Image: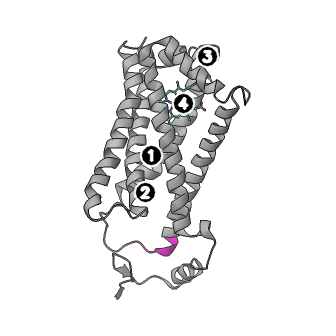
Amino acid sequence: MTATIERGSATARVNPPADATAKTTKSRRPRGVLGSSNGKKAVMAVTGAILVLFLIGHMAGNLKSFFGAETFNAYAEFLRTMGEPILPRRVLLSLIEVVLAVSVGLHMWSAISLSRQAHKARPVKYAAKRKSQAGGYVVHIMRFGGITILLFVIWHLLDLTFGVVNPAGWDGTPYERLVQGFDPSRWWVTIFYVVAVILVGLHLRHGLWSAFQTLGLASGRSYRPLRAAAAVVSAVLVLGFLAVPVAVMIGVVK
Ligand code: HEM
C-alpha cells in the first residue's frame, strides 16, 4: 500500500479511491466569493462578531436584575422603545432581531458548508488520528454545541420573551418572568440554562480563537495572549450569564 503526502496537508493519506479523486477535482471549480472557503470563513467571522456583541450587551442587561424590578423592567422597556420618536415602538428592536436571526442562519450555513467542503477535499479519513483543533472533541463541541444552543435559544424565547412556558406568562413583567422562570421548583430549567451557557462559552472560546487565526493575528508573540483573550472573554460571559439564574435560585434576586 502506498501513501501520498499532499502539499499543504499535515498528514499522510492512504490511496483515495478513483471516485473520491473525481469528487475532489469537481470541487475545485472556480466559484464566487461566498463559494470560496475564505469567503465562508469571513461570513462566519462577521456573523460570529455580531452574535458576540449581542451576547456582551445581553449579559450586561441581564445584570441589571441585581438592581431590582424597576431598573430591570425599565431596561426591558428601553429595548422596546429604542429609536422613538423617529421610529415606532419596537421597530428598532425588531430590526435587531432580524439581524440576529439572519446572522444565526448565515453562521450555521457557513459552518455546514465549510465542513462539507473540508469533507469533499478529504473524502478518505486521515490514516493517523489527529489531535489538532480541527478534529476530535472540538468538532463535536462546535457541531452538537451549536445545535444545543439553537434549541436552547428557542426554549429561552418561549420562556423569557413570550412567556409561553413561563409561570408568569405573557402578561407578566420581564422581571416577573425572570424570577418565576428560575424559581427553585423549576431547578431543571436552571440546569438546562447552566449547561447551555457553558456550551455557549466553549463555542465562543473556539470561535474567537478560530477567528483570530483566520485573520492571521495568532502568530508569534501574539499567539499566547490571543488564546488567553479568547478564554477570558468566554469565561466572563459564562460567569455573567450564570450569575442571574443562580442569584434567583438562592434568593438574592427575588
Ligand atoms: C442564562 C442567562 C440568561 C438570562 C437570564 C437571559 C435573560 C433573557 C431575558 C429576560 C430576555 C427577555 C428580554 C425582554 O423581554 O426584554 C431574553 C431574551 C433573549 N435572549 Fe437571553 N438570557 C440568558 C442567556 C442567553 C443566551 C446564552 C443567549 C444566546 C445564546 C440568549 C439569547 C436571547 C435572545 C436572542 C433574546 C431575544 C432578544 C429580543 O429579541 O428581545 N440569552 N433573555
Q: Identify the image quadrant of the N terminus.
A: bottom left
Q: Residue at x 41, y 84 (%)?
A: 15
Mark number displayed over residue 169: 3
Residue at the disc numbered 2? 211
Q: Residue at x 57, y 77 (%)?
A: 27
| Viewer-nearest of discs 2 and 3 | 2
Q: Which residues are magenta?
A: 119-125
Three-letter amino acid code of the residue under disc 2: Ala
Q: Residue at x 58, y 35 (%)?
A: 154
Residue at the disc numbered 4? 156
Three-letter amino acid code of the residue under disc 3: Gly
Is 193 rendered above or below residue 179?
A: below
Three-letter amino acid code of the residue under disc 1: Gly
2 or 3: tag closer to the N-terminus = 3
Ligand 1 within 8 Å of the CB at mark 4: yes
Q: Secondary structure at mark 2?
A: helix
Q: CA distance from mark 2 to mark 1?
A: 18 Å
Mark 3 Cα-neighbour bin, 10 Å: few <14, some 14–19, many ≥20 = many
Q: Are marks 3 and 4 in contact (CB under 8 Å)?
A: no
Per the image, is 139 magenta?
no
